[in-house]
């Protein structure tokens, strides 16, 4: 099991390195001068050059990439010196703890550093630390809604196969898979928060935290989570329902299911104890993949409902060409995708020992 875990973790690290390379080189070959974006087009040349030097933009792309890796790593090497060199430790850049020091080189431990926003000059990690929990909550509630209702609909559709109800569930699944999240968000917001607002009491826009009108601070507005979560969960709900249905129909036709029925087991026990466990493998794959996808796909839904998560941060930073913030947000979503895939591989290894041998 440890060998299996180590292999999957190694694969995940290689994927992350590839993602970091793509993100860095993509945003470092785009046109535009970050120094002028920060200072404005009327800034004088000396100020622009000073900002470029501070950001390390006066170095080659290769050196900037190695320093970017060095900043992102929780354990990194630095050279203490007054002048800038290949590895340069800036006390004002981030907090650190020196582990080992040999000569002028130090091995330090720190929180991964993603740079500072060009617009607000705040650390990217600080901005994402505020927005990420909102996106994580939205994705978790959406996938939970999709998983529970999707599995129930899939089981019911498999049991009632070739009936009107089963066909209606199939139509719903196909419609849900083909419905774009951005379009669904607009329709759902208009229908339930505008047309039916007097009955639902829901808002068209709003985040988890709302400001009290009487100046008594912020409070949690849970009802603002309902429409974004339903909108984001429609597509995975449809896929989970269809996967559960098709997988369960296939399992119910197996010989060991007929044997269990012949032994006199109740239909409920056959479904829960034997069929459902073996039918859930493709469903687990879909749920894990969609949970990671929801972290990225929430961009449009968050923007429509003004849910203050990573999606809104990405849209706002794209409008202002805030490259460090965009790179940090994309990198954070990629890390979540890799971590979720590793967790799913571990679950597979527990459910099916044959996978550990691969």
Image (spheres, rainbow, N blue to C red):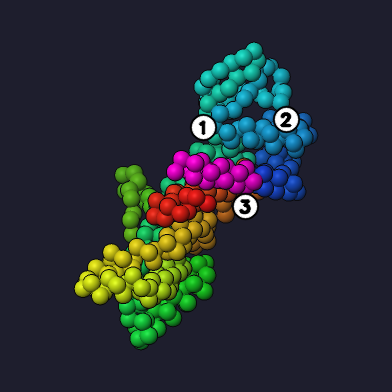
- Give the mark nearest the N terminus, 1 or 3: 1
Between the C-alphas of marks 1 and 3, the distance is 25 Å
Q: Secondary structure at mark 2?
A: helix
Q: Which residues are magenta?
A: 1-19
* Residue at 35 percent of width and 86 percent of height: 163
Q: Is residue 209 above or below residue 166?
A: above
The picture quadrant where one finds residue 223 is: bottom left
Residue 90 bears which disc, if any?
Answer: none
Residue at the far top in the pictured view: 103
Q: Secondary structure at mark 3?
A: helix
Residue 107, given in percent of the width and then of the height, sits at 58, 22
Q: Main secondary structure of the magenta part?
A: helix
* Residue at 31 percent of width and 44 percent of height: 216
Residue 281 shows in the view: yes
Per the image, the residue denoted by label 3 is 318
Q: Secondary structure at mark 1?
A: loop
Residue 53 bears which disc, if any?
Answer: 2
Residue 250, given in percent of the width and then of the height, sits at 41, 74
Mark whose residue sits in front, 2 or 1: 1
Q: Count how many numbered circles sit on residues in the image.
A: 3
Q: Looking at this view, is 233 or 195 the one in front?
A: 233
Between the C-alphas of marks 2 and 1, the distance is 24 Å
């Amino acid at each position: 099991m440890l060998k299996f875990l180590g292999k999957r973790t190694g694969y995940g690290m290689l994927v992350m390195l590839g993602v970091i390379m793509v993100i860095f080189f993509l945003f470092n070959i785009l046109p535009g001068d970050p120094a002028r974006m920060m200072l404005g087009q009327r800034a004088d040349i000396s100020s622009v050059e000073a900002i470029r030097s501070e950001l390390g933009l006066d170095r080659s792309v290769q050196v900037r990439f190695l320093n970017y890796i060095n900043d992102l790593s929780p354990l990194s090497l630095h050279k203490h010196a007054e002048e800038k060199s290949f590895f340069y430790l800036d006390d004002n850049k981030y907090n650190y703890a020196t582990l080992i020091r040999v000569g002028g080189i130090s091995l330090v431990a720190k929180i991964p550093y993603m740079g500072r926003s060009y617009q607000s000059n705040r650390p990217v990690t600080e901005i994402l630390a505020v927005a990420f929990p909102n996106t994580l909550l939205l994705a978790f509630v959406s996938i939970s809604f999709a998983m529970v209702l999707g599995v129930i609909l899939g089981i019911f559709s498999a049991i009632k196969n070739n009936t009107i109800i089963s066909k209606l569930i199939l139509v719903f699944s196909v419609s849900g898979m083909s419905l774009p999240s951005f379009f669904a968000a607009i329709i759902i917001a208009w229908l339930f928060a505008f047309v039916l607002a007097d009955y639902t009491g829901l808002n068209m826009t709003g985040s988890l935290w709302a400001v009290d009108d009487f100046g008594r601070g912020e409070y949690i507005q849970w009802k603002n989570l309902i429409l974004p979560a339903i909108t984001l969960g429609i597509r995975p709900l449809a896929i989970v329902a269809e996967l559960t249905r098709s997988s369960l129909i296939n399992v119910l036709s197996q010989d060991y299911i007929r044997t269990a029925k012949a032994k006199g087991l109740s239909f409920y026990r056959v479904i829960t104890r034997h069929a459902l466990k073996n039918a859930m493998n493709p469903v687990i794959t879909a749920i894990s993949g969609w949970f990671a996808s929801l972290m990225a796909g929430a961009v449009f839904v968050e923007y429509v409902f003004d849910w203050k998560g990573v999606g809104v941060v990405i849209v706002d930073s794209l409008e202002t060409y805030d490259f460090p913030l965009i790179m940090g947000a994309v990198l954070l979503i990629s890390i979540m995708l890799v971590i979720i895939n590793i967790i799913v591989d571990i679950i597979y290894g527990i459910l099916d020992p044959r996978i550990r041998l691969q």
